[in-house]
Image: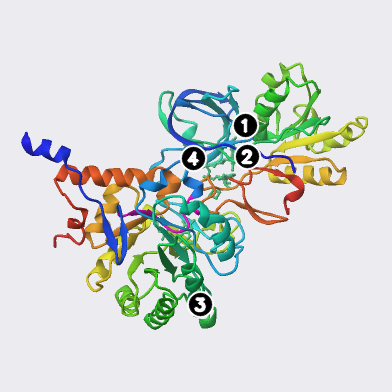
Amino acid sequence: MAKMPMGNPTYLRGQIRERKRIGSLYHRLRISLPQPIGPVLPGQFAMLKIEGGGSIILPRPFSIHNFEEGERVPWLDFLFKVVGKGTGLLAEISVGSPIMVLAPLGKGFPAPPRGYKPLFIAGGMGIAPLFPLIMRMKSSSSPLCLLYGAKSQGDLICLSELLDLKEITIKIATEDGTAGTKGMVTELLKGDDDDGGDQIVIYACGPEPMLRAVSKFAAEHKKPCWISLERRMACGVGACLGCVVETKRGYKRVCREGPIFEAREILW
Amino acid sequence: MRPERYYGEMMPSLKVKLGELELQNPVMPAAGTFGYGEEYSSLIELNRLGAIVTKGVSLAPQEGNPPPRIWETWGGMLNSIGLHNVGLEIFAKEKLPFLRRSKTPIIVNFFGHTIDEYAESARRLSDLEGVAALEANLSCPNIKEGGIHFGGKPQTVAKTTKMIRRSTKLPIIIKLSSNVSDIKEVAIAAEGEGADAISLINSIPAMAIDLETRKPVLGGITGGLSGPAIKPIALKAVWEVASKAKVPLIGVGGIMDYRDALEFLIVGATAVQVGTANFINPKALLEIIEGIEAFLKRKGIEDITEMIGSLEL
Ligand SMILES: Cc1cc2nc3c(=O)[nH]c(=O)nc-3n(C[C@H](O)[C@H](O)[C@H](O)COP(=O)(O)OP(=O)(O)OC[C@H]3O[C@@H](n4cnc5c(N)ncnc54)[C@H](O)[C@@H]3O)c2cc1C
Ligand SMILES: Cc1cc2nc3c(=O)[nH]c(=O)nc-3n(C[C@H](O)[C@H](O)[C@H](O)COP(=O)(O)O)c2cc1C
Ligand code: FES
């Protein structure tokens, strides 16, 4: 199995540097850190402590969406969708506010095996951890391809930044047909299948039904496939055993053995 | 002002004793919230803790409950981890060597499904190098008694404690649940059979429902409530038991900061365990130790044992 990279987490009082609303439900946050952490790997996440009095006590996990590559990382970007209390409060947070950050956590995406071409598959918010991976790989020689699906055009976050990259081909699917092909992102896979005999490795993140479909495709076509999973979390560091997923080798902690897993390991 | 300068230079003693076991300070993690120590080791200096309490181990590895296993509630959280653990053998081989590297006493939390299993675990854990004390979690369902937890009845507590006592020379801590009709009786039963200390309380049986699906939110259907929401219940349990028991007590439940910790000492606890707070603030244990020290300095209290049972009625 490919080596799964990870590093030691740090707990710091960060500060909100920027908060940008993207459409009606999405936000981007930049958190500056009092001292640099690092290195950070694409696919790793952070626990953010959102102040919500008694109604929110546990920190929330978010993928690290963007960061400056290097040994010392002075700020972290997050991309999030408002789905409940915590993300609702985070969407209102003012620039300059302090926020406790525990990062980097979990394992990052492993590099593609030699000679393999990466295929990225994102569903909605799933673009968050894939974005820094794309940024890292865009300088490699092999051509990149992203299949990007969402409910509607407005849910294709980061699309303009991605379209600016000349190194990547993007195919889009929306459920309502407002952009790209109408339908599910997994349907784009069928077209990709007869792309010549290239060796591909899949990197996917998105809603669980999508990941299940991608895993099935990868298994049927014998493609290596890495997915990023989400679970409710308490500690984020592997101590509470609260975030487990059932795998072929028993329950594994998403925060520690994941969030990046090899798709064929998961019992769906 | 002279007294203040004097207080500023004073180094209060934070040392406490749980039977034979001496601790440099009374603050330790609660079982199951600190993994096997290693998980938090890059975030917290393990050497500064009063003790390290491990995740509960059993003779055989246990898979635990199906997910979802955690749920947030107002001021607390539910967990239905279901005592998922690596089992005694892997604990000894893979987890204990790391813990031994720190000079902090290691307290191994353990449980069984029968009294014999408790005794057997105690015996085998005592053979391991580097274990300072054992903490028996009696909140586990007793399969021979229709799943009522071992801590439920004074007779069962007495019997279980007695068998553990016979199986080990290490100090034993009996950890009780507040889910009983009279916690004093249960605690006295443990004390009578040789418990060196008593921890109270475990998380409180509870549940949560998803209105949309009408399903329980936890894979285990019910779970245990922990966090700030349970602190008043835990405080009362410690206070009640302190009025009857002579052995030292360890207060557990909803401790978030040094104030909470000291309140437990005031009602009669000798030491405290901090659980859910670790998830909220991974430096909570250290901040509590530092906060206690600063408080004692501020008040000119030279020895923390002056706080124990100092409740003014
Ligand atoms: C490793 C990891 C990376 C993540 N990265 C991102 C990201 O980059 N951007 C983003 O928007 N979200 C991300 N999530 C999901 C995010 O953590 C949840 O959306 C968030 O915790 C919800 O908090 P809330 O208080 O708003 O929701 P709550 O009020 O607690 O719940 C509202 C809804 O959110 C769901 N939910 C709650 N917690 C989680 C969770 N931990 N994982 C998945 N669903 C959850 C609940 O099932 C519920 O339907 C990630 C989760 C994990 C585990
Ligand atoms: C995730 C989790 C796992 C736990 N596992 C154990 C365990 O293995 N053994 C045990 O005796 N108590 C266990 N407990 C109970 C805690 O040790 C503690 O008694 C309880 O959480 C109350 O303290 P708190 O409010 O500070 O968390 C667990 C609690 C949580 C939240
Ligand atoms: S969140 Fe605690 S083990 Fe993963």
Residue tagged by mark 1? A41
Viewer-nearest residue: A152 or A87 = A87
Mark 2 secondary-structure assignment: loop
Chain of residue at mark 1? A
Chain of residue at mark 2? A
Question: Does mark 3's beta carbon lie closer than 8 Å to ligand 2?
Answer: no
Magenta stretch? B26-37
**In this rendering, position of residue B264 left or right of residue A210:** left
What amino acid is at disc 3?
Asn
Chain of residue at mark 3? B
Mark 4 secondary-structure assignment: helix
Report the residue at 44% width, 62% height from top: B131
Mark 1: few, some, or many residues within 10 Å (few <14, many ≥20)? many
Q: Are marks 1 and 2 in contact (CB under 8 Å)?
A: yes
The question of residue B30 being in magenta is answered with yes
Mark 2: few, some, or many residues within 10 Å (few <14, many ≥20)? many
Query: Distance of mark 1 from mark 2, alpha carbons?
Result: 8 Å
**In this rendering, position of residue A94 left or right of residue B303:** right
Residue tagged by mark 2? A107
**In this rendering, position of residue B118 left or right of residue B234:** right
Label number found at residue A86: 4
What amino acid is at disc 2?
Lys
Magenta segment, principal secondary structure? loop
Residue tagged by mark 3? B142
